[in-house]
Image (spheres, rainbow, N blue to C red):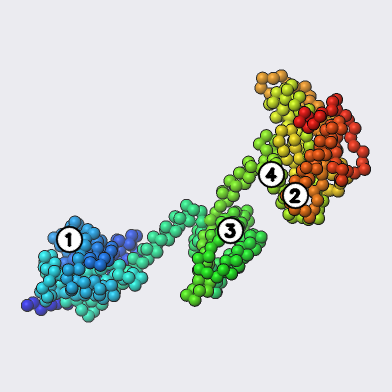
Amino acid sequence: MPVPIQPDAMRLLAALAKGSRALMRGRFWGDGVDALLGEIGQASGASRVWIFQLLELQDEAVIQDYVFEWAAKPSYRQLTQRRFRFFASVFDDPTYRRMVAERQRGMSQRFITERMAPGPLRENLESQQILSMVTVPIMVDGRWWGTLGIDDCERPLDWEGAGLDALVIAAELIASSLYRHQLASRRRQFELFQQVAECGIWEIDLHSGSTWCSRALLRTLGYPDDYARLPLRRLLAHMLRADRQRLWKRMRQCLSDSGAGQSFRLDVRLQRPETPARWHEIVAELACDTSGRPSVVSGLVIDISRRKQGEERAMLAAEYDELTDVMNRRGLTRHLQTTLKRTSTTLCHLLMLDIDHFKQINDRYGHPAGDALLKLVATRLDNELRGQDVLARMGGEEFAVFVSGLDDAQAWQLGERLRASIADTPFLLPPLAGMAAAPPVTITISIGIARLMPGQDLEHAQSLASTQADQALYAAKRTGRNRVMPYPQAAPASPQATQPAASRPSDRGSD
């Protein structure tokens, strides 16, 4: 029986040093592993150095794949053989089952074939003409990821002592390189995800207040990618104060529930120096430590500025009149309720306006001319209002004006000014297709005014004011049109306009 020989430990250590540099500098992870296996193979004089990756560990078999190989000469190559692609090794040999269990625990094995007990494992090695073999498990995060192995088809190498230690180090180098590769891959995935989703990732330690921000989030806030540490106070300073207060409120609600998995979403505005604030959505989730106490809150910051712009455009479409570009009934309702929520003492008034005899304009000049006149009326009315006043088209030829901060007499005076602006200056309709230029058109409007009583239920106050202003408008129509009529409880002592129209309608529906 030939005496086993041992590999040269010093040559192996030199190979490890050279191979580790290749692992660190290689552009691709696999290139570095190939270089390391080659250094080990040449230093040991072995026939073949290989890596099997564990794919699945079943009750009765192990599924593996032959992923790396260095061979001393072409006749020793096995990587291209189909029998080693996604192959299954059945536990029909107690020795092999024990070997798999040891690999799971991180233990290495070495074999000299002629000294092995008869069985399937020895027969397998003999079929490949392997005289000696050594295997070292590659452990990643404490789990068996794969196996580093060396076959010698010419010598019975005895791997023990320093030689075996060198192989264990090689397996650890491969594991650490694989771990870095996985981290780099995840980082690239994160960066791609953040780029596509326009988001950043963050985490806050609730015990220490320490923060971590992804590179994408750092860039969003105006910091370099490699910025060392962003304190919590500075991180929150990028959020507008009102939004920061809302965030703290949601955080307190989340922490009061004190359970893992608590999450929330919040739209906030973030800004960087000398740039306008942009809307972002914060997605946050709370995690607890082993004792159940809240420990970490983390999540995403997603740029939703384009979504907000879309929402604003949708709101404009929903709350503004397409023809006249002033608010519609829905927009007026929202503005009125927002204003009344904000104050319970400021006196407010609602003015309802209706164009007198508008049907005659449509009958004489056509509906396109009527639409053009509505635009001109809206522009002229709006020019008479203050910046905080709101003009809305309620439908057809009917408009409404909402004002605040005026007393009853001032509200009536505003109504008179609006009435006069329409009645005193004729309108010049623009040339329309298919018709000659229309002569100047003189029209009048009737106005009803009602007071919105502060301190009432919002819907009730709005409904009551609308009804009262409508009744006052009916009264203005019945008493001659082209006049301002306050609801009786709000009527001032000032005289009303006296420019009677040519006929008296029986109701508003006839103009």
Q: Nearer the viewer, mark 3 or mark 2?
A: 2
Q: Position of residue 28 (x, y in %)?
A: 33, 60
Q: Which residue is under mark 2?
A: 460
* Nearest to the observer: residue 68 or residue 286: 286
Q: Which residue is under mark 1?
A: 77
Q: Which residue is under mark 4?
A: 331
Asked whether the beta carbons under mark 3 and mark 2 sit within 8 Å of each other, the answer is no
Q: Is residue 328 left or right of residue 208?
A: right
Q: Nearer the viewer, mark 3 or mark 1?
A: 3
Q: Nearer the viewer, mark 1 or mark 2?
A: 2
> Which amino acid does the dot numbered 4 rest on?
Gly
* Nearest to the observer: residue 8 or residue 338: 338
Quadrant, the N terminus: bottom left
How many other residues sit within 10 Å of disc 3, few (<14), some (14-19) or many (≥20)?
Answer: some
> Which amino acid does the dot numbered 1 rest on?
Arg
* Nearest to the observer: residue 318 or residue 389: 318
Quadrant, the C terminus: top right
- Indicate whether 399 appears above or below 143: above
